[in-house]
Each structure stands twice: as structure tokens, then as C-alpha cells.
Amino acid sequence: MTSKTPHGVQYEGYRPVVMGRNGMVCSGHPLASQAGIQILQKGGNAIDAAIAIGACLNVVEPMMSGIGGDGFIMVYMKDSDELRVINASGKSPMAATREMYLATGIPHKGITSVLVP
């Protein structure tokens, strides 16, 4: 399956499309995904599964995980009918203003695309 990103980058997908009825887990490593699935199967929620996935990724992909990365989380809490969103990204440099990004768009490389933890 060939896909194109919003930025015009074309790439060849190597995974099939999957759908789930009761939940879904994905991560950068199959063992971490399995840990998340096991948490859901034992009655845990998406946040419980995410914590298990993160712990597992710190073991199987320590070079890609840790406290220095960004985190973007959106979770629907069925019991309370709430949508919770957490933006755990870093701060932009002081010279990078909202107006600058509105005028030029968000760059995908270069100094103004970097966040400061």
C-alpha cells in the first residue's frame, strides 16, 4: 500500500490495515504491544496499558524511550464520559512565536522544529 503524508512524502506501507471492536494497542515494539494487550485483557484501561507499554519500551528500546521525549495523549474515559488530553511536549525557543509558526507553518527540520525539554 503506497501512502502520502500531508507534506507530500510518499512511502510504501508494510503493514496491513487492522480494526478492533473492543480496543487496540500499538507501539514501536511487538513485546510492548503485547504487554498493553495483556493489561486490557485483565480489565485495565488505556492509561494502564500505556504505562505498561512505556515500561516495556524502556527495556526493549531504551534508545527510543525515556523521560527526555515528547508525549501526546488523548484518552476517552468511558466511566466518566470524559475526553482527556495531555500535551507533554517541550517548550519552543523564546524567539519562536505563535505568529511565526502561523505565518510559515511548522517546519519538519531545522532549528525551529526542535523543542526544549
Image (cartoon, rainbow, N blue to C red):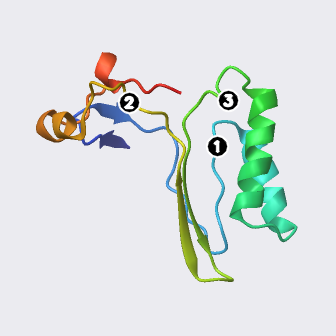
Per the image, the residue denoted by label 3 is: 65
Q: Mark 3 or mark 2, which is nearer to you?
A: 2
Q: Earlier in the sequence, mark 1 or mark 3?
A: 1
Residue 47 quadrant: bottom right
Establish if 109 lies above or below 8: above
> How many residues crowd mark 3 within 10 Å: few (<14), some (14–19), many (20+)?
some
What amino acid is at disc 3? Ser
Q: In the image, what residue occupies the spot 51% across and 50% down?
A: 16
Label 3 and label 2: CA atoms lie apart by: 21 Å
Residue farthest to the right, as pictured: 42
Label 1 and label 3: CA atoms lie apart by: 11 Å
Residue 12: percent from left, percent from top: 38, 34
What amino acid is at disc 2? Ser
> On the rendered image, what quadrant is the N terminus found in?
top left
Q: Secondary structure at mark 3?
A: loop
Residue 19: percent from left, percent from top: 55, 65
Per the image, the residue denoted by label 1 is: 27
Residue 71 quadrant: top right
Per the image, the residue denoted by label 2 is: 92
What amino acid is at disc 1? Ser
Q: Secondary structure at mark 2?
A: loop
Residue 32: percent from left, percent from top: 75, 42
Residue farthest to the top, as pictured: 111
Residue 15: percent from left, percent from top: 52, 43
Do we see residue 49 in this rendering? yes
